[in-house]
Image: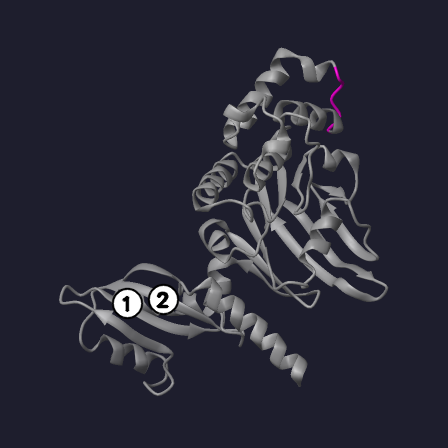
Amino acid sequence: MMMIDTADLTKTYEGRGGCRGVTLQVPEGCIFGLLGPNGAGKSTFVKMLAGLHRPDSGRAVMLGQPLGRPEARRKLGYLPELFRFQEWLTPTEVLRFHGQLGGLRPRDTRSTAFRGRVRDTLELVGLADAAHRRVGGFSKGMQQRLGLAAALLLDPELVILDEPASALDPVGRHEIRILLKRLRAKGVTVFLNTHLLEDVEALCDQAAFLYGGELLASGPLRELLGGAGDGGVDWRFQVGGWLPDSLAALGESLGGPSVSPLRLVEADTNGNAVLSARVADREQAGYLCALFIQIGLTLYESGPEPNSLEDWFIRMAASRQGGDAQ
């Protein structure tokens, strides 16, 4: 099931800015990262999903319901980038208020079960010891944790987080990473809008890249990192049974060494080797895997090359800037 499914979703401001024609799918149970430079349209897209902005055109389905349906909103947790809590309230009071905003009756938020839920949620985000302190004395990081608690309070199936760790120190960011991985393990889908590339690299199963309001790339993170902007993917293979003449044999099978895409990265004296090739798609990678087995090699592992997310981000932005210049 796709938790988020948009087609040509568009929102501009007097014809400028925003995002245009975004078609994007977010599978259930993954952590999905939305990337792009400042002004790319990420916040506009997130606000449309959260129901804060109405699209100009296009289609969107969230949690199996058309965008904005109450049935979907009840299953959604949302942490906005900019938020402010009443300074005179305590975290316990803030969460009680958010419970009512989520559809609970006032008397339900005073029940023993709900009080236990509030206590558990505050403990989850590291605010158990501050449950009865006034929010006005909180640091930005503590307020961000409280916002995350509000997003998680009612056990959502989908959580949309807009810059959830921007105000946290390294220890706090590490704790949030652990929390998001626990949510994924429970089957919760996390949609993450962040400029912290290391968080995306550490957490996300899939990602998308917005630039100038348009979607440039989307898919599994490993496959995105293998690309170089020409539609190809750098693929790595680990094999056993490697012999000194194996590379030549593979080259002949592929039409000659001059046209073979394979490159030997390393090999040891025990017959283990790592090869690399630039392939057009998974199908071509699968053909090479079959060829290895055909000539007597043992295939241990294959997959896209693990490139740096920062390198990929810069490469994607530079490719679009070059296109704009033309």
Type of amino acid at the residue the image marks with label 1: Val
Residue 165, horizontal then vertical, whole percent:
54, 46
Instruction: Report which residue position mark 1 lands on.
Output: 274
How many callouts does the rendering have? 2
Q: Which of 244 and 264 is in front in this view?
A: 264
Q: Can residue 282 be seen in this view?
A: no
Q: Where is residue 211 in the image (x, y as percent from the top left)?
A: 65, 67
The furthest residue to the left = 269
Q: Return the residue at label 2.
A: 236
Query: Tag 1 or tag 2, which sits nearer the N-term?
Result: 2
* SS class, disc 1: strand
Q: Do the residues labelled 2 and 1 touch (CB within 8 Å)?
A: yes
Per the rendered image, the range of residues in magenta is 102-106
Q: What amino acid does circle 2 point to?
A: Arg
Up the image or down, 158 lies above or below 9; here it is above
Asked which secondary structure carries label 2, the reply is strand
- Cα–Cα gap, marks 2 and 1: 7 Å
- Is residue 47 inside the magenta stretch? no
Question: Residue 162 at x, y = what percent?
Answer: 63, 48
